[in-house]
Amino acid sequence: RHSIKEAWGGLSGLQYQLPATWTAVKRNNCSATEADIAKWWSLNPAKLAGLSQRGSIEPGKRADFVAWDPGFNGFPERYSVEYHRWKGDCYFSTQDLFGRVVGTWLAGRKVYDGINDQLLLHNGSYIKCQD
C-alpha cells in the first residue's frame, strides 16, 4: 500500500479527467450521454474501491458531488490552478476542452467554487479502499 502523495508524479491531470472524457465523447461523436459520464466517474470508481456510501446520490448516502457545465469550452490553464506536485506538465491543461466543474460538495458542504477556482473548505480526508 502506497500513498498517492508519494507517487512520483502524483495524480497529474486528475482534475481534468471529467472534461477530457466529455471532450473525447463530443469530438468522436460517441453515443455516451452526460449520465454515462457520471456513472464512469462516480458510481464505477466507488464500486471498484468498495465505497458503498459514495458514487450516487441516494437517501442515506453521503452527499458528495460536483456540478459542472457540459457546454463550457476553454483551456483549463486559463481558468484553474493545477493542484499537483509538478505544475505545468499536465497535457490536458493546455488543451481546448469541453465542460468545466463549477462546484464540488463533500458530505453536502460546498468545498470548491469552480467559477472562481477557490477552495472553500479543507473538508476532505484520505479514503482507504475496502479490502
Image: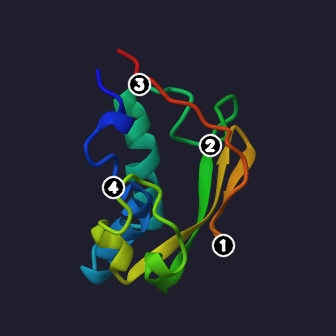
Above or below residue 69? Residue 110 is: above
Q: Which residue is mark 1?
A: 115
Residue under the point 28% across and 39% down? 7
* Mark 1 vs mark 4: in front: 4
**Rendering coords of residue 87 (x, y %):** 38, 63
Q: Is the image coloured rainbow, by chain, by secondary structure, or in one colour?
A: rainbow
Residue 64 is labelled as 2
| SS class, disc 2 | loop
The amino acid pointed to by label 4 is: Ser
Q: Amino acid at mark 3?
A: Gly
What percent of the width, then of the height, locates residue 74?
46, 85
Place of residue 114 in the rendered image (x, y in percent of width and height, measured from the top left): 63, 66
Q: Which residue is mark 3?
A: 50
Residue 126 rendering spot, x and y as whole percentages: 51, 30
Whole-angstrom CA distance, mark 4 to mark 3, is 24 Å
Q: Nearer the viewer, residue 15 or 6?
A: 6
| Amino acid carrying mark 2 in the image | Asp
Q: Measuring 47% from the left and 85% from the top, which residue is drawn there?
A: 73
Can you say which quadrant of the picture contains the N terminus? top left
Circle 3 SS class: loop
Q: Nearer the viewer, residue 108 or 127?
A: 127
Q: Are marks 4 and 3 in contact (CB under 8 Å)?
A: no
How far apart are the alpha carbons under marks 1 and 4?
21 Å
- For marks 4 and 2, the one nearer the N-term is 4
Q: Earlier in the sequence, mark 3 or mark 2?
A: 3
Q: With 8 as the anchor, is 63 left or right in this view?
A: right
Locate the C terminus and report the quarter of the image it occupies.
top left
Q: Residue at label 4?
A: 12
Q: Compute the Cα span from label 1 to label 2.
A: 18 Å
